[in-house]
Every structure is written in C-alpha cells, then in structure tokens.
Amino acid sequence: MPDLNGLHVSDLRFAYPGDAFRLHVPLLELAEGKALALAGPSGAGKSTLVRLLTGLLPPTAGQVRLGSAQIDTLNHEQRRAFRLQNIGLVFQDFALLDYLTVAENILLPHQFRGDAGTPACTKAHDLATRLQIAQYLGKRVAQLSQGERQRVAVARALVHEPRFIFADEPTASLDPSRGRIVVDLMIEDARARGACLVMVTHDPNLLPLFDQTVRMEDFAAA
C-alpha cells in the first residue's frame, strides 16, 4: 500500500511521438519529509520525469500518486488546481514574470489562491533573506542576473509551503557557495514541514545531502 502522504510511482511509461526516447519507471517512492535527487546525463529524461510527476505531461501508461491524489487520472483543470494548492515548482527557465517585482513574483502562488496577506509577505521576506535576495524585493526581475532570478524562483516555489516540491536544476546559474545555500534551504524546508522534495541536479557533490538518489540510466525503457 503506497504512503498516502508521500510520492508513489508505479509502472510509469512515456514516449514522445515520433521520437526514439523511451522512459519506464517500474517503481519510485518517496516518503514525506524526504529529499530525492534525480541524476544522470543530459537527455536522460530528468526534466521529462519531473513534468510527468507534476502532471504537466500525461504518461503513456502507469500511475503517479502524490499523497492521496492520483495525478494521471485527473483532467487538465484538476491537475492545475492540484498544482496551485500542493506543488512548488522551480523550472529550468525560471518562468518568472519580468514586469513584476521580485516580491510580486515570489508571492504569485498566494495571489492565485487569494491569500497574499501579512503572513505570506513575512514568509516571502524570510525566504528572500535566506537566499540573499532581500535587497531586490522592490526591483523588477528583469533587472536581475540569472543567478538572482534563479533564487527568486526557488523562493516562489517554497513560499506557500507546498506538500510537494520539484526543482529542475535550481543551482545551475549559481556559484558553489550559493548553490549550497539553495539546496540546504530546500532540504531543510522539506524535512521541517514533512514535504517531499525531488530535485534534478548535475552536481555529484550535492548527492550525499539527499536521502535518496535515482540515476536516470536505470529508467531506460526496454
């Protein structure tokens, strides 16, 4: 019986139409409060797996369960509503809104939910301080460097205290010291709140920090 508070994947299969790429995940489980690293070479399917786990891509077959929700059975609007309420996402391209300030970008999950009050603003400021971007809260993100923008995306993913956090290379634009700050914060946040963290990384030095490591080579479909 899968842990209804964690992540459970069984017999997940995916293929892009007209492409030789194939992905097969026989079993993947992550308990609440645990952190999992997805490792492997470029093109191995790390980003694709994150999109499958979050419902941004529908699988060809198999089951993806986040807590008690079976993502693969939900329709588009149901998946979107579930993500807004329960998932924090850090995309490779950050997916920030350049015309908004740093503070406004961080608070977007709360704006969508209609609860961007004082507690949310306090949380946003605390995260920005930890990530060393508090001095930019009033600036538009278009004025920031890539590394600064990346940290804004991390703060946005954590601010609404989601049960599931997915981060696709959240340290790619950062130097090692700031990258370690980001990873430590995300792992600490997941453990403190009993959330599940799945992070894509190319940095082998970060892998010992995680409770589990999955190498995408193991999921090459036959």
Image (spheres, grey):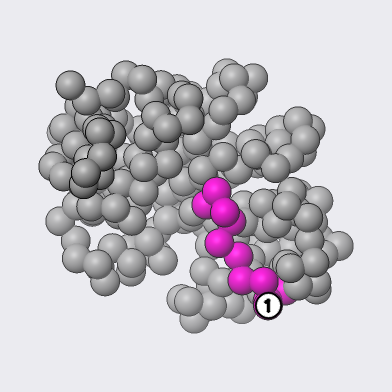
Give the residue displayed 42% in from the left and 49% down from the top.
164
Question: From the image, which quarter does the C terminus lie in?
Answer: top left
User: What x and y, as percent, mark residue 196?
Assistant: 43, 41
Q: Is residue 164 above or below residue 119?
A: above
From the viewer's side, name the closer residue of 170 and 198. Answer: 170
| Helix, strand or loop for disc 1 | loop
Question: From the image, which quarter does the N terminus lie in?
Answer: top left
Q: Residues within 10 Å of mark 1 (few under 14, many from 20)?
A: few
Which region shows up in magenta? 90-101
Give the residue displayed 19% in from the left and 65% down from the top.
75
User: What x and y, as percent, mark residue 193?
Assistant: 51, 46
The reply, left or right, for residue 31 in relation to residue 175 is left
Q: Is residue 166 above or below residue 142?
A: above
Choose top left, top right, bottom left or bottom right for residue 29.
Answer: top left
User: What x and y, as percent, mark residue 147?
Assistant: 74, 48
User: What x and y, as percent, mark residue 192?
Assistant: 55, 42
Residue under circle 1? 99
Give the residue displayed 80% in from the left and 73% down from the top.
138
Give the residue displayed 62% in from the left and 52% down from the top.
154
